Image (cartoon, rainbow, N blue to C red):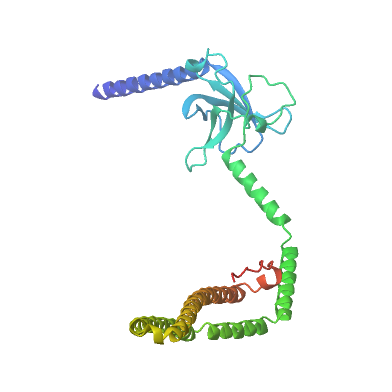
Amino acid sequence: MASARVNFTVGLFMTAGLALATVAIIWLGMTSFLRKGEMFVTYFDESVQGLGVDSPVKYRGVPVGRVTDIRIAPDYHLIEVVILVDDEHTGVENRFAGSVASLANVGITGAMFVEIDKAKPSTLDLAPPLSFTPEYPVIPSKPSEIKKFFSEIEQIARKIQSIDFKGISDQALATFGSLNAGIESAQIGAIASDIRTLLASLNAVADPTRLNAMAQNMDRTVLASRTLMERAATDLSRLDEILGQIQGIVNASRPHIENTLGSMASTTLKADAFMTQSTATVFQMQSSIKELQDRMTTTADNLEQTSANLNALLNNLKDQPSQLLFAQPKKPRQVEE
């Protein structure tokens, strides 16, 4: 009796479970079958590997529908993907106007989904042209990021292949050969030796010791001139004293020395003229010495600048010998006299 009751209970539970499972399957199927929405279609000019029926369709990352069918387009070139937009996103006119569809990856699993986004002005030109009339409203498509990546790699490879590396190499070798021949014919070593000799001569001329000696000689000349002026002033003072004494003698013995006084007056005038001429001569000597000092200073500066320019030229010739052949000569520098 207990065994029959257990069997009945187990059978009842099994029957109820099968009934519930059947109802759930029927309900889910009917829900999918009765699901309403709006149909769109898009066409891809690339492989849709990884995209399947019921794959999600997203608008800027927000799920808006699913893929209901994937088949070859009537032109047997494009791939037709039919999209069902959910009920909550239907009823809005032109909601996908100015949008483009593209394939996107779901992480690293290899699964694909359809991504809808607003199109840029240059993106609509990438949509493949249609030679047939679609069954549903069309959302233009654009190449996926993977396709664009491989297309760019292919373009780069074509550009690299189109470069004439052999011609460039031959031209470079010919250029280097011509440059070496020009450098050898220019005799850079001889020119550098001549320039070093010239620099040594200039350094010898512009020796600071010699310049100092010349300056000291000029100073001595100026000191000698000053000493001469001081002596001349002392002589004038003594002459004034002599003239005073003579004047006293003249006053005491006027009748006897009239002739002598006339001679002394003439001598005094001559001495005065001589002192005036000596003073002018000393001033002229000072002016000449100052002018000579200015010229020597200018000459020393010019020699120093010339030496610096020649040293810079030597360094440039060591670093870039080609400038000797191709550089334009500079205008000569005017030296102040």
Of residues 230 and 329, the one nearer the viewer is: 230
Residue found farthest to the front: 255
- Residue 203 in view, yes or no: yes
| Numbered label tally | 0
Left or right: residue 73 compared with residue 56: right
Work out whether 159 lies above or below 198.
above
Could you tell me which residue is drawn at 73 percent across and 76 percent down? 182
Left or right: residue 113 compared with residue 76: left
Work out whether 196 lies above or below 316.
below
The picture quadrant where one finds residue 172 is bottom right
Of residues 260 and 309, the one nearer the viewer is: 260
Residue 70: image location, x then y, percent: 61, 29
In the rendered image, the quadrant that contains the C terminus is: bottom right
Residue 122: image location, x then y, percent: 63, 32
In the rendered image, the quadrant that contains the N terminus is: top left
- Residue 212 in view, yes or no: no
Could you tell me which residue is drawn at 62 percent across and 36 percent down? 143
Left or right: residue 230 compared with residue 214: left
